[in-house]
Image (cartoon, rainbow, N blue to C red):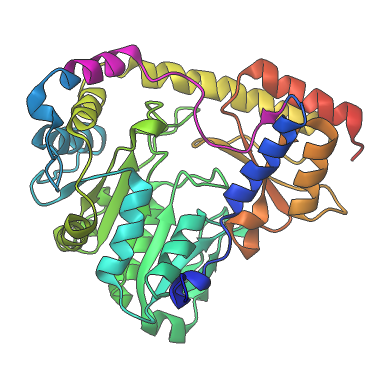
């Protein structure tokens, strides 16, 4: 008797689980591990958001099955956020959908809009979920190189004609995980023009849109005229509001794509717990000082990380958005060899770049979701134990 479909058999092991296994083994061996691999904020969820969740938990009406499309308060809050932040008008009823985190939404959108054999264009290196959900939806994933030669942006003109003829969807992700790259609105204008000419749906993953530095403000693809004709944008409260465990996100934009996703979701899940949605609505529409405060903390950590890595011979550059530094491994190492060596010798965890696709080989990703003191300690350990 077989317990795995052919579809699932095509999925490679989830590499992040392997990194976490390495971490657990080190912890069990008594190592004081400094985890610079995971992108889970260590700063607490702002108190006023937690208090709002506690308040909403006291209302029995909130403890019933939630609406499939999301609580009206949350969808209206997302629409209000887009109006205030980007001057983008959204219909909360048809152009906003609540998600159990943006990862869930991405995973369910592809089987809702692509068919067997359709091609999905995605960044390489890029968030592994794009590739995995494509395979689970019986699609074909095409790696669009995003590297330093083009400021970590895809070169649309380099995509082969035969691939474009079969392409149904394109993923974009800025601020980027893993590269930390950011873009201005003109890039999205080019992307929309390209997608329209080839009848491709654009999925903009904007999970780090509010985590920005150096006076940079991340644009929304929906600011481009006509973008809602073919684009959706995913967002999350996980990073900016330190709400990773809440599992709350949203998708906005093209109403037909959102309708397809809502049909799919209504058959496989029962929505986000209503008190969480109402706490998330509160987060989006009330005092934003915690976002500003946390970004200042992350900016200081980023500066510390860049300077510390440079001091030991690592090519590290500052970023304007996101949680991660993307650096080449020292000469003589593969991505996995470097990460394994650093963990074994120092107890410091990085993420190997090849997790993010073939284009990530030769790089490693560093998170700065730990305090400054631990960042400095991590680099001192590497300085003492390894010679690059």
Task: Give the extent of the magenta segment.
Answer: 33-55
Res 262 → quadrant = bottom left
User: Does the magenta portion include 37?
Assistant: yes
Could you say which quadrant of the image residue 311 lies in?
top right
Against 277, is 133 above or below? below
Instruction: Say which of 86 and 304 sits in front.
Output: 304
Question: If the image is split into quadrants, where does the C terminus sit?
Answer: top right
Is residue 65 toward the left or the right of residue 145 in the image? left
Residue shown at 72%/38% (left/top)?
Answer: 25
- Seen at 43% across and 16% down, the residue is 293
Above or below 91: residue 229: below
Quadrant of res 196: bottom left
Q: Residue 78 at what x, y percent from top left? A: 20, 37
Q: Residue at x 21, y 35 (%)?
A: 273
Q: Is residue 16 left or right of residue 29?
A: left
48 vs 54, nearest the viewer: 54
Q: Relative to 220, is 2 on the left or the right?
A: right
């Amino acid at each position: 008797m077989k317990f795995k479909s052919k579809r699932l058999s095509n999925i490679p092991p989830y590499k992040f689980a392997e990194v976490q296994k390495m971490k657990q083994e080190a912890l069990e061996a008594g190592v004081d591990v400094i985890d610079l691999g995971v992108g889970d904020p260590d700063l607490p969820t702002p108190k006023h958001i937690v208090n709002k969740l506690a308040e909403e938990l006291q209302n029995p009406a909130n403890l019933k099955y939630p609406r499939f499309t999301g609580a009206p308060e949350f969808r209206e809050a997302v629409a209000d956020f887009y109006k205030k932040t980007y001057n983008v008008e959204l219909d909360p009823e048809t152009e906003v959908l609540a998600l159990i985190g943006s990862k869930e939404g991405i995973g369910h959108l592809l089987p809702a809009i692509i068919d067997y054999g359709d091609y999905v264009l995605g960044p390489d290196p890029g968030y592994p979920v794009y590739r995995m959900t494509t395979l689970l939806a019986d699609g074909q994933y095409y790696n669009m190189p995003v590297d330093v030669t083009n400021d970590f942006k895809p070169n649309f003109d380099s995509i082969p004609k035969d691939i474009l003829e079969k392409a149904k969807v394109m993923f974009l992700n800025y601020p980027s995980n893993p590269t930390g790259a950011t873009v201005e609105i003109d890039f999205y204008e080019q992307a929309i023009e390209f997608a329209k000419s080839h009848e491709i749906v654009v999925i903009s993953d904007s999970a780090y849109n509010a985590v920005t530095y150096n006076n940079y403000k991340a644009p929304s693809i929906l600011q481009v005229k006509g973008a809602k004709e073919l684009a959706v944008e995913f967002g999350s409260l996980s990073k900016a509001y330190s709400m990773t465990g809440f599992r709350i996100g949203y998708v906005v934009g093209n109403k037909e794509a959102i309708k397809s996703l809502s049909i799919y979701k209504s058959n496989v899940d029962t929505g986000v717990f209503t008190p969480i949605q109402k706490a998330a609505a509160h987060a989006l529409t009330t005092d934003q000082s915690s976002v500003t405060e946390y970004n200042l903390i992350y900016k200081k950590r980023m500066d510390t990380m860049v300077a510390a890595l440079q001091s030991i011979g690592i090519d590290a550059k500052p970023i304007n958005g996101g949680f991660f530094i993307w650096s080449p491994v020292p000469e003589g190492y593969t991505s996995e060899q470097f990460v394994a060596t650093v963990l074994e010798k120092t107890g410091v965890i990085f993420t190997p770049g090849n997790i993010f696709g073939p284009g990530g080989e030769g790089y490693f990703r560093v998170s700065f979701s730990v305090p400054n003191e631990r960042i400095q300690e991590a680099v001192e350990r590497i300085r003492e134990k390894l010679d690059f």
